[in-house]
Structure formats: structure tokens, C-alpha cells
């Protein structure tokens, strides 16, 4: 997910999406530990998407204060 797409989401939608992505990341990491994924770079992309979402939420939090 690109930063432009993240910025279009409302704060509540972004928080919900973040929780879903975190759950997906945990599931993917667990599956990779048991049997290797076909494309392990998906884990890296998902981790970076989560970081982008957390960054945007933090920026919004700081701007509202």
C-alpha cells in the first residue's frame, strides 16, 4: 500500500486496517517459520506497509495536539 493510499483513509479506517495488517503479518511470519513461503519478500513489504501506517497515525496524532 502506497503512502498516498494511506493518507486517503480516515483515522478510524487506518486504525482498523493497521490491526488487520498486523494480524496478517503475524500469520504470515508463523507460516513462514513452519514452511517457507514461495515469496518471502512479502513479509518485508507487509512490515514496511505497517510502518507507513503507524507513521501516518503518529503524524495525525501530533498535528491534532
Image (tube, rainbow, N blue to C red):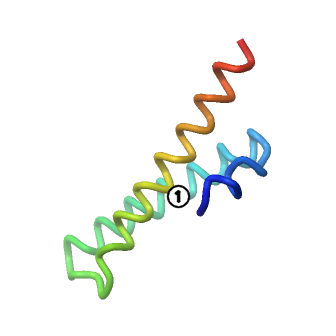
- Give residue 31's position: percent from left, percent from top: 30, 74
Q: Position of residue 26 (x, y in %)?
A: 37, 59
State the image coordinates of residue 14 (x, y, percent, origin top left).
68, 47
Residue 52 at x, y percent in the picture: 53, 47
In terms of depth relative to the viewer, which is nearer, 42 or 20?
Answer: 42
Q: Which of the 4 image quadrants contains residue 47? A: bottom left
Q: Is residue 22 left or right of residue 4?
A: left
Q: Residue at x 56, y 50 (%)?
A: 19
Above/below status of 30 relative to 52:
below
Which residue: 57% across, 46% down?
Answer: 53
Q: Which image quadrant for residue 12?
A: top right
Residue 44 appears left or right of 64: left
Q: Quick check: 51 above or below 42?
A: above
* Quadrant of the rendering where the C terminus is positioned: top right
Q: Residue at x 38, y 73 (%)?
A: 42
Residue found at the far bottom of this picture = 38
Can you name the residue that lies furthest to the front here? 4
Residue drawn at x 32%, y 83% is: 39
Nearer to us in this view, 26 or 10: 10
- The 10 Å Cα crowd at callout 1, few under 14, some 14 to 19, many 20 or more, is some
Task: Count the numbered circles shown.
Answer: 1
| Image quarter in which the N terminus is found | bottom right
Q: Secondary structure at mark 1?
A: helix
Q: Is residue 52 above or below residue 35?
A: above
- Residue pointed to by mark 1: 21
Taking the image as shown, residue 58 lies to the left or right of residue 25, namely right
Amino acid at each position: 500500500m502506497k503512502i498516498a493510499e494511506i493518507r486517503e483513509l480516515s483515522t478510524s479506517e487506518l486504525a482498523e486496517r493497521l490491526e488487520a495488517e498486523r494480524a496478517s503479518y503475524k500469520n504470515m511470519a508463523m507460516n513462514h517459520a513452519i514452511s517457507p513461503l514461495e515469496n518471502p519478500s512479502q513479509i518485508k513489504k507487509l512490515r514496511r506497509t505497517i510502518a507507513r501506517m503507524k507513521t501516518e497515525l503518529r503524524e495525525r496524532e501530533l498535528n491534532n495536539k
